[in-house]
Amino acid sequence: MVKPLMMTFVYNERKYLPHAIEYYKRNNCDVYIIDNYSNDGTWEWLQENNIPSHRLDTNGEFALKVLQADFMETLKKLKPNWVMYGAGDLYHIFDKPIDEALKEIEDNGYNAVNTQCYSAVNTGEVHKIPLPINYLNLKKYIRVRMIARWSEDYNINGDEVNFEGLNPCDTGISVNYGLCKTLDEWNDKLERRKKAWESGGADKKHGKHLVKYKTKDLIYPLKDYENVKNLDILPLVKKTWFLI
């Protein structure tokens, strides 16, 4: 039996987390959240809904090194068999329930997954949630390795998992809706990241896309993106759309 764990750290994700967590739970996954001292009610919501979680204070910085170190220490206590490094705005999607997909992958001799990542954007839509239902314009991005069997030497650097004996397969997709958030949220995220760059809490190469993608209003030209309805990943993405 494979019981995947979706684990992530969050900051002010109160309005996004419920949909994401429901998605993973319906895919037969456990969930664990590290709250980076949110002030929007995220922590309170996690407690009210009995979501396994704890808090970590990084003094207002998006200190990726500290957060990922805590992530790995927490995994040593939880000892899951498969781990999905996630986010409140990131959906890992397969052509079958996630637990079944990972069991099949494991039975075929693999211990990690490289998913094709797609970035969704706001092309002029009024900001609404859930994000997967209201933002349908995507661009194909890189492959990411954020799903793997856990082992004692499990290590994650940026968005990439590594360990001794790594044997990944290429399957599934990951859709990132981070660029669909509001300008205020984006600016807050960027400022937290800048503080970490300045203090050494995060490498400058991690998160530089926040500056690259930032525009005046976070509205992106429709001509540069493909509507998901025209992509061959439509059957997979529907798995998130229908989760209301």
Image (spheres, rainbow, N blue to C red):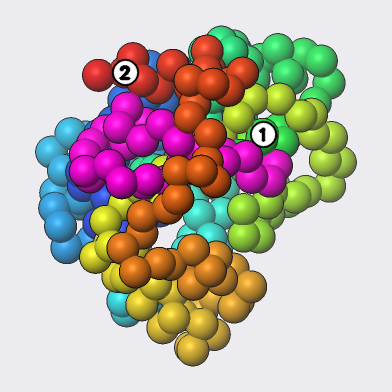
Dot 1 amino acid type: Thr
Residue at x 48% of width, y 29% of height? 227
136 over 232 or under it: above or below = below
Are discs 1 and 2 less than 8 Å apart at CB? Answer: no
Label 1 crowding class (10 Å Cα cut-off): few <14, some 14-19, many 20+? many
Q: Quadrant of residue 40?
A: bottom left
Residue at x 26% of width, y 56% of height? 182
Query: Residue 35 vs residue 165: left or right?
Result: left
Residue at x 77% of width, y 13% of height? 107
Check disc 2 and report the residue beneath it.
Answer: 243
Q: Residue furthest bottom?
A: 198
Viewer-closest of 11 and 230? 230
What is the number of the mark on residue 16? none
| Magenta extent | 118-143
Q: Secondary structure at mark 1?
A: strand
The tag earlier along the polypeptide, 1 or 2, is 1
Residue 171 at x, y = what percent?
71, 25
Q: Quadrant of the N terminus?
A: top right
Q: CA distance from mark 1 to mark 2?
A: 21 Å
235 over 8 or under it: above or below = above
Q: Does the image show residue 24?
A: yes
Residue 210 at x, y = what percent?
48, 67
Asked whether 56 falls inside the magenta stretch, the response is: no
Residue at x 72% of width, y 36% of height? 114
Check disc 1 and report the residue beneath it.
Answer: 115
Query: Residue 78 vs residue 130: left or right?
Result: right
Residue 233 at x, y = what percent?
58, 21
Dot 2 amino acid type: Leu
